[in-house]
Image (cartoon, helix red, strand yellow):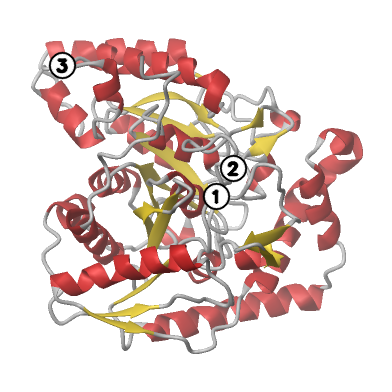
Amino acid sequence: MSSERMAYTSAMELAGLVRTRQVSPVEITEAALRRIEASQPVLNAFITVARDEAMAEARAAERAVATNDELGPLHGVPFSVKDLVNTRGVRTTMGSLIFEHNVPETDAVAVARLRAAGAIMVGKTTTPEFGHKPFTRAPLFGDTPNAWDRGRIAGGSSGGAAVAAAAGLAPLNVGTDGGGSIRIPAAANGIVGMKATLGTVPHDAAPDSFGANIYVGPMTRTVGDTALMLQAMSGPHPSDAHSMGRQRQDFVEAAASPGGLEGKKIAWRPLLGNEVVDPEVLAITHGAARAFEEAGATVVEVDDGFVTPEPFWRVLSQAAWRARFGGYVEEWGDRMTPTFLRSITEASNYSAEELQKAIYQRTQLFREVQGWFREYDLVMTPTLTRTALESDLDLYDPVVIEGREVGIIRQNWYPYTHPFNLTGHPAITLPAGFAGDGLPVALQIVGPYADDAAVIRAAALFEQLRPWADRTPSLPELDR
C-alpha cells in the first residue's frame, strides 16, 4: 500500500489490515510520522511529534501481532491528541508558553482508553492558548492554516486535530469542545467531529465536573471511525460525575447498520439566534438536510425566535478562565495571547449575581432544547454561517458575510455550536459539500440527551446518501 493511500485509509480498515497481517503497525506508524514531519512547514498542525515514543509502541504492537496476542479494536492505528489533553510522558502545553515544558505523569482517561484499545499516539496537535478561541494560533507555535486554503483559518480550538484528519496525518484525532471547538474546525476542514452527550466521554481534567461544558471527543474523516473512537473512549469513570450510571451504547453497530428513518420527524433550523447565513452555505446545508427525506424522514423548517445564549455562555466561560488562569497574568501577561488576556479582563466585570444567573439560564436552555425532542426525533442546522474565515482576522473582529459586517464572531460565525455545550446534547458535524470558494460546508445533527447512538445512525445514513471521503485537499508538498 502506498503512503498516500495509507494516509486516507480509515482506521477501521487499517485495524483490519493489521489483524490480517497485510500491513504492520510499524509500517503504518512510520508512514504517518513521515507525513506529519513533511507537513509541518506547510500546515503546522503539531506542537509535539512523539516519534520515539510512537515507534517504540509500534514495534511492541508488531510483536503482539507476531505472537498471536489478543488485539484491541484499534491495534496499530495512529492517533493524535490535542495539546489541552494530558498524555503520559509527552508534554502537554495547552498552547501556552507557561506550560511549554509541562510533562504529565498520567494519560487523560480518553487517551488511556485509546491506548488500551491498541492505538498508537503520534503527537500533540495545535490549539490556541488554553483553547480560548476558534483560531488555531498561539505565541508558542504560530499559526495553523486551513487544510484546503492557506489563506483561511483552520478554525479552533481543535484546529490542529482537524487539519491532521483532513490532510491524512492521522486517522484518529482527539479534540476538545467548549463552545464548538471540535465542530468548528471539523466543519471548516471538511471532516467529521462529534461532541457527545455530557459525560459520554469522561473528562477527568475538568476543574468543575458538575458545571462542565467542555467535552473530549473524536475527529475523523468518516462516521465509522468516529463511532469506533467514541466506543473506545466512552464509559463511566469516577473522575466525571456526568459519566456515572450512563447506559453503554454500541456506536460501532449504530454506524454499521443505521437503518432508515421511516416515520421520523426532523427539525431543520437554519437560524439559531443569528440573523444571517451565507446564501450558498444555506442552500448546501438545506439540500443536505433534505437528503434525509430520501430515507423516509419528514423534514420541517422551524424558526421559533430562539435567542442566542452566547452572552451567558461568555459569562460562564470567561469567569472559568479567570478563576483557572488569572493567577498567571502578573508574571506571564506580556507573553500571553492578547485576546485571552482581554477575555480574562472582561471577566473581572462580572458580579456574583451575573454568574449565578448564567448558571440558571443554562438550566432553562437545557429544558427548552430537550423540549424540542417531544416533537422531533433530530434537529439539524448548518454548522457555520459561512466558510472558513480569512487568516488576517482574530477573535474580536466582526464577521463579514456577503460583503457586510454582521456582528461578533461567536454570535455570527458559529451560533449553532455553543448552545449544545451548555445543554449537553449530542451534536455531530458532517461534510455537506463545497462552496464556490472551494472550501467545505458542513451540516450539524443534534439528538436527544444521552442518545448518542441516534446521532451516529443519522450521520452514518447521511454518509451513505452523500459520501465525501473520496475528496481530499490538494497537498502537493506531501503527496509526491
Residue beneath disc 3: 65
- Is residue 451 shown above or below 187? below
**Could you tell which of marks 2 and 3 lies nearer the N-terminus?**
3
Q: Residue 153's mark?
A: 2
Q: Residues within 10 Å of mark 1 (few under 14, many from 20)?
A: many
Where residue 67 sits in the image (x, y, percent)? Answer: 12, 12
Q: Residue furthest right?
A: 330
Marks 2/1: CA distance? 6 Å
Q: Amino acid under label 1?
A: Ala
Q: Are marks 2 and 1 in contact (CB under 8 Å)?
A: yes
Q: Amino acid under label 2?
A: Ile
Given residues 357 and 245, the one toward you in this image is 357
Image point 85% across, 35% down: which residue? Answer: 332
Q: Amino acid under label 3?
A: Val
Name the element at disc 1. Answer: loop
- Is residue 176 shown above or below 347? above
Residue beneath disc 1: 388
Q: Residue 206's mark?
A: none
Where residue 25 sits in the image (x, y, percent)? Answer: 25, 17
Residue 376 lies left or right of residue 45; in this view the side is left
- Using the rendered image of the protein, determine whether residue 409 is visible from the camera's viewpoint: no
**Could you tell which of marks 2 and 1 lies nearer the N-terminus?**
2
Q: Nearer the viewer, mark 2 or mark 3?
A: 2
Image point 62% across, 40% down: which residue? Answer: 136
Where residue 479 sits in the image (x, y, percent)? Answer: 36, 19
Given residues 190 and 83, the one toward you in this image is 190
Marks 2/3: CA distance? 41 Å
Residue 374 lies left or right of residue 475; in this view the side is left
**Could you tell which of marks 1 and 3 lies nearer the N-terminus?**
3
Image point 17% across, 27% down: which residue? Answer: 71
